[in-house]
Amino acid sequence: MTTVHADDTLHTRLGRTALRVSRICLGTVNFGGRVSEPEARALMDHAVDSGVNFVDTADMYGWREYQGYTEEVVGRWLVSSAALRDQVVLATKVGNPMGGGVNDRGLSARHIIAGCEASLRRLGTEWIDLFQMHHVDRDAGWDEVWQAMEILVRQGKVRYVGSSNFAGWDLAAAQEAAKARHFVGVVSEQCLYNLAVRHPELELLPAARAYGVAVMPWSPLHGGLLSGVLRKTAEGRAVKSGQGRSAAALERMHGTIERYEQLCADFGRDPAQVGLAWVTARPGVTSTVIGPRTPDHVKDALQALESPLSDEQTALLEELFPPIGNGGTAPDAWLS
């Protein structure tokens, strides 16, 4: 496996922590249904051999087979080599519904602790490096959430706590409550952020920067919208690009995406690489979560990281996908 030195450009600190993670995070949402277990194991092997040490999953992933399937796939991979668990920074999530019971969801202390125990069993590991709240739960008070997380940290089952799909004020509220308890609190936030969705720039990114929270964009290509969806559709190979989030956005952004793909052609670069290169270079972004289906997708992401866009190329993209309002952070972004 690849030996990575602390001064390399592929790795960085996870927010204000001393933990070093790869700037490309291997997301596993496609494992099960779109990626078979042998393909998933080959993909994870390739990623680790390429220097990617950050793997992200969730308790609910694998729902095309059954909830928890993906964690089981990752767990079987981790135990296949004695060195893997120490080499990989493992992240998973809790909070989404995992059953039909009224308490099988959310961020109650009961569900957080039960969810962690279940994830540990499926992953076949004694600890989770980054245990993330999958969505804010405004029915759960922060003292309850942090009490549960403190128990898991004291037990050695969780190293760090992260969030996902939080608003800027949720992040601030969480951190202030954690600070009052003398607890580290949130160290990372996963958010939907890409050329087509720039809302985090208004308040979430500034809040993360103020609190030293790592930002991990998910769906950096907006479900395939920014990966050459028009070209792939014309060629009959739009596996994911023509579905879900991408298809819905394409209806309202067809003209923009046409111009985007032409602009990428003018750059002499693949649209997926351009979209990834843009988001990985954004101020405040720590690690970009990709959802690859093949080793080539991992190679594309690493190439995007190694070959940043020029200032001129970035400016052309900014014209095509302008920031919200006047650009920048709130409230200046909407003040005339």
Image: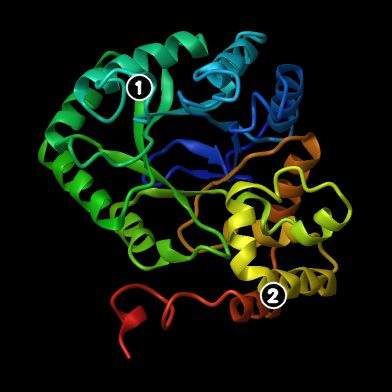
Q: Amino acid at mark 2?
A: Gly
Instruction: Give the Cα separation between the discs numbered 1 and 2.
Output: 46 Å
For the residue carrying disc 2, how many other residues have a C-alpha within 10 Å: few (<14), some (14-19), or many (20+)?
Answer: few
Q: Is residue 56 above or below residue 171?
A: above
**SS at circle 1:** strand
Q: In x, y percent, where is residue 312?
A: 69, 80
Q: In x, y percent, where is residue 287?
A: 54, 47
Residue 310 placement, left or right of 167: right
Contact (CB < 8 A) between labels 1 and 2? no
Residue 197 placement, left or right of 203: right
**SS at circle 2:** helix
Q: Residue at x 76, y 43 (%)?
A: 239
Q: Quadrant of the N terminus?
A: top right
Q: Is residue 12 above or below residue 35?
A: below
Q: Nearer the viewer, residue 233 or 36?
A: 233
Question: Looking at this rendering, what residue extends furthest in the right direction?
Answer: 235
Asked where in the image residue 87 lies, by quadrant, the reply is: top right
Q: In x, y percent, where is residue 205?
A: 38, 60
**Along the polypeptide, which appears first: circle 1 or circle 2?**
1
Q: In x, y percent, where is residue 250?
A: 64, 62
Q: Nearer the viewer, residue 321 or 85?
A: 321
Judged by depth in the image, the label closer to the viewer, 1 or 2, is: 2
Q: Residue at x 78, y 35 (%)?
A: 295
Q: Amino acid at mark 1?
A: Val
Task: Give me the disc on residue 41.
Answer: none
- Give the labeled residue for mark 2: 255
Task: Give me the disc on residue 158.
Answer: 1
Inspect this view and state whether residue 220 appears: no
Q: Is residue 84 above or below residue 11?
A: above
